[in-house]
Image (cartoon, coloured by chain):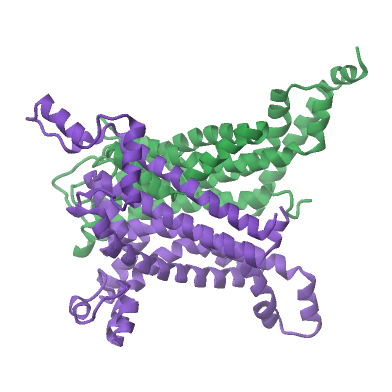
Amino acid sequence: MSRVEHLGAAWPAAGRLRALATRTRRLGEIARESLRNPTTLVGGVIVLLLMLMAAFAPLLIEPNQPNAYQMPRDFSAVNVAPGTDGHVLGTTPTGGDVLYGIVWGSRTSLRLSLIVVAITVVMGVAVGSVAGFIGGRWDEVLMRLVDIFLSVPELIFALAIAAMLGPAFGNIILALAVVFWVKYARIIRGQIIHVKQNEYVDAARVMGDKSWRIFFKDVLPNSITPVVVQATVDMGHVVLIGATLSFIGLAEAGLAEWGNLVSEGQSGIIAGRWWVATFAGAMVFLWSLGFNLLGDGLRDVLDPKSERR
Amino acid sequence: MQVREYIVRRLLTLPLLMLGVSLLVFGLSRVGGSPIGIYIEHEMTPAEVAQIEERFGLDESLPEQYIAWLGGVVRGDLGWSGVSAAPVSSILLPKFTATMELAMLAALVAVALGVAMGTFGGARRNRLGDHVTRVVAISGASIPIFWFGLLLLIVFYLGFGWAPLGRADPTIYARISHPTGLYTVDSLLNLDLRAFFDALWHLALPAITMGYGSTAIIARMMRSSLVEELGEDYVDAARAKGLPERLVIRRHARRNALMPTMTVIGLSWGFLLQGTVVVELIFNWPGLGRWMTDAVLQGDQATIMSYVLVTSVIFLGVNLVVDVAYAYLDRRVVLGQ
């Protein structure tokens, strides 16, 4: 057994334990700092409340049958003002209960943002990793592709795709997934190129580690932080853009979704019926604000350049 | 890398990017299958359908179709706009000027607000004023533009009856000539101050709605670069010679902090352009965005494709100008890489 192999065989267990301890300590540090940072704190509280609302929607309001994501219609109570019995936040021009739309809309938003962010992070990180870690011609080709995607403003791109696919919420999800992955590709590529130059990566290579092992063990974990921040911000951004698309009219009519509700309430504004658009739009704002604050604060908390060191 | 080399390289990649965008846009038209659906009706025989396919070149291979389409675009033939019942190329210009007038004023709002807020926050780092401007700026990035516009309408149109809808008062519009299509400029050329204020009046709410959304990114950049500049030696020197802090910021730090902020102004154009889509819908503004939403709802392919193409070209163009100007002004950017 050569000397290097011998070292490799003796150390992993202790090394892994130490790594685990460091990681746990780091997580505790992040949590403590997040609580001290006013931005993450406020954002976190907003996000937490919205998540609770989405999680407990069936307990808050009885789901509509057969499809809970479709607004129940009460044609005997059309355009009812807020504060009425049975319709605390009023109703839409088609008799939809605004409170129902708001509570179940949080579930629609959660579904939308989770699906889109999950798909785009995986896609973007995969493409960006290939470009950054393998480099060379792969990098050149993939990054030009990313440049092309970034040449079209994202809302406009998503709007065009969704329009071509036809009005349906599923198509909005698809359109957003096509548009949002590029950012992650660019972020992770830059990080990987930077991290690759570190001495511990050279050390791993000298020790004879396989490329894929170096990538997953040393490079990716040290490159992922900005992706986490971006994903947090995008949890809000996806809902903002998705609501804009359904406001324009690209979701199914009657879907319990906030942008849809604003669109339904828009026509009544001239007649003084302000409540539908105001309440539903405020939810989009809160959702997006919560994740934006959280992401913005995390950027500071996770930044090794901030006061922590 | 030399500045000139950088600029040349940027100029050379521009056509390649545009070619890529054109491929993307062409791909868009095939996302929902062949566009033949627009032309055929139920009672047509297969022979008639084949005839239509042949007439529009839809029986050829995709690359051939793409080249035929691109050739048309280069010659200025962008297809037939269903929503306007006219060739796209003939209606593009007035809509383009309407949107540009709105976007430019919104950019002015965004830059003025963003620079002011960034300076205010940066000068009061981590104090109350900084936190407040941060929240105001992040709110701008989080607020759904369609909702913010409606709120402004509820307050200023319904509540106070101050704000107008549309682009101009028809009687005032009719009494001046329109050489440029930018109403504010036209009215000044006509030496008609009333028309000028009318145009501004109609621009105000939509421009504020759009501008606020782009403020955050500018404010954030301005704040962080001001904080950085305030740590430099020349700032200490200015303070040491007894200059009041207000002047240190205004005369020295802010000027240098504006440099990196310039680059995000280019980026924020993307936000502005996408903002026009909903803002024009809400305020009934007769520009490209309104045209796009009409087209989206009616599935008008030629209009959607032209819109995406035109917007991307504007976006790429603005970013190129900003980056080149920045590289020229601040040589560290390129030389350092």
Residue A115, quarter of picture: top left
Chain shown in green: A
Q: How many numbered marks have been drawn onto this rendered protein structure?
A: 0
| Colour seen for chain B | purple
Image coords of residue B205 (percent x, y) = 35, 70
Question: Residue, x 68% and y 82% (percent of image)?
Answer: B247
Image coords of residue B284 (percent x, y) = 25, 63
Residue B10 higher or lower than B221, as above or below: above
Q: Can residue B207 be seen in this view?
A: yes
Q: Can residue A97 be seen in this view?
A: no
Residue B11 higher or lower than B235, as above or below: above
Image coords of residue B316 (percent x, y) = 48, 55
Name the residue nearer the viewer: A61 or B2. Answer: B2
Name the residue nearer the viewer: B190 or A14. Answer: B190
Residue A277, quarter of picture: bottom left
Image coords of residue A291 (percent x, y) = 51, 48
Q: Judge from the rendering whether residue B242 lies leftward or rightward of residue A171; answer left or right.
A: right
Name the residue nearer the viewer: B152 or A138. Answer: A138
Query: Residue reaching furthest left?
Result: B43
Residue B233 higher or lower than B333, as above or below: below
